[in-house]
Image (spheres, rainbow, N blue to C red):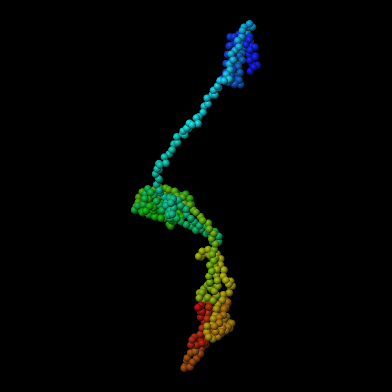
Amino acid sequence: MLKFNNFRNKIVTKITSTSKFLLLTALSISLILMFFRAPSLAQIPPLKQLPIEEGSETQSAPEIGIEEDSETQPAPEIGIEEGSEIKPAPEIGIEEDLEIKPAPEIEIEEDLETEPGPEIGWEFLGSRELNQVEIHETKYKGECPGYSWSSREARFTSSTTPPARKRRVIVRNITRGVASDPYPFTDREYYEGRSSEGTRMSFGTKHHSKYFHVLNGENTFEYEIKERNRVIESGVLTAVIKRNVDVRQRDSYPITKSVCMNSEVPMSLCADIRTLTQYKCGSDWVIRSFIQPNTPEVGTLISNQTPYSVKYWINNRIQKLSSGSDRIYTNNFLNIKFKSCSVGTGDGKNSKECTIKTRSLERGKRYKFTVSELDYESVDIEDFPRS
């Protein structure tokens, strides 16, 4: 700043007071415009050079000088007093205590009541939902595989046309995928309560006289409510029938009982009783069985229930059985012979007649020898039931 003032004083001495005043004024304005108003030098476009004609004369710019003997007055200094207050530029902002009001909200009245649509479709016992139900079925795996089908009772209802006397409802399943000649349908009475007469709904593709067949998933139905022979309401509705399959393990279970090796012989007369164990999947489905003791021979019992010994022949081989004894034979075929005598009267004299009796014994059966109470030699063989 000091150098600038010395330089300025040297020049000022050579300039007249009027020129000096004009020069200082122009300089001050230029400085003010440069720092506060004028754009930066980089933004000022360069001056265009005007073309000069080749034959034209150029005149030199007039020289501005300062007379040597003229008096110069110092230019007034422009500055800022040290003690003066500098007012800051006003700040543009938002007052802290100023309340900012939010934009008004557009609300929908919650109290507006919408009228529910008509209730038309299927009701299911135990379900609160209309036209929605699950049918539970069971698939078995293991030794006894199989499938257990199931059904649900369904009743048609319509809030627009409630049940009344002389009314019936016909509902057809027109879902794509079911047979169409005819469509599965149900024809039910519709005369009392809130819904129609019940129908059993199960999965299938064709019409059935006992069940109303549907597909798994969404089904489309068309219905007609008739009063006598006149249709008073008709329409189309959809219902979702879901199949819920429960997969379970099912194996066989054993059943043990006593059997006669010869199934044609009753148990009371059976001589060869054994233990049979059967593994079943149901009342009539046996998947395996075994019998104990597991021997192929079948025993036949002969017992002597007389007070005497009995002599007889089995397959032409002589045998003797004492009183109270039993004997088991395992032959497949048994022919027995024995002697039986009876005392008769003729010509006033007692006479004795003896014969050879022959019998074929049934395999696996119980037999016993007996005698007549009046004649101990009158021997016979008969069935021997268990006591």
Q: Residue furthest front?
A: 83
Residue 267 pos. (x, y %): 51, 74
Say left or right for 13 vs 93: right
In the rendered view, tell whether residue 24 sits above or below residue 238: above
The foreground one among 327 and 137 is 137
Percent of width and height locating residue 349: 48, 93
**Image quadrant assignment for residue 39:** top right
Q: Is residue 8 above or below residue 344?
A: above
Residue 229 makes an appearance in the image: no
Q: In the shown orientation, is residue 15 left or right of residue 270?
A: right
- Between residues 279 and 340, which one lies in front from this camera angle? 279
Counting every numbered tag in the picture gives 0
Q: Relative to 85, does residue 71 appear above or below in the rendering? A: above
The residue located at (58%, 16%) in the rendering is 78
The foreground one among 105 and 180 is: 105
> Can you give x and y, in whole percent of width and height, for residue 158 in the image?
39, 49
The picture places residue 21, in percent across and down from the top left corner, at 58, 11
Tell me if I can see residue 279 in this picture: yes
Residue at figure coordinates x 50%, y 54% from the top left = 244
Locate residue 71: give its quadrant.
top right
Residue at position x 58%, y 17% from top? 79
Question: Which image quarter holds the N terminus?
Answer: top right
Q: Is residue 128 left or right of residue 21?
A: left
In this picture, residue 128 sits left or right of residue 335: left
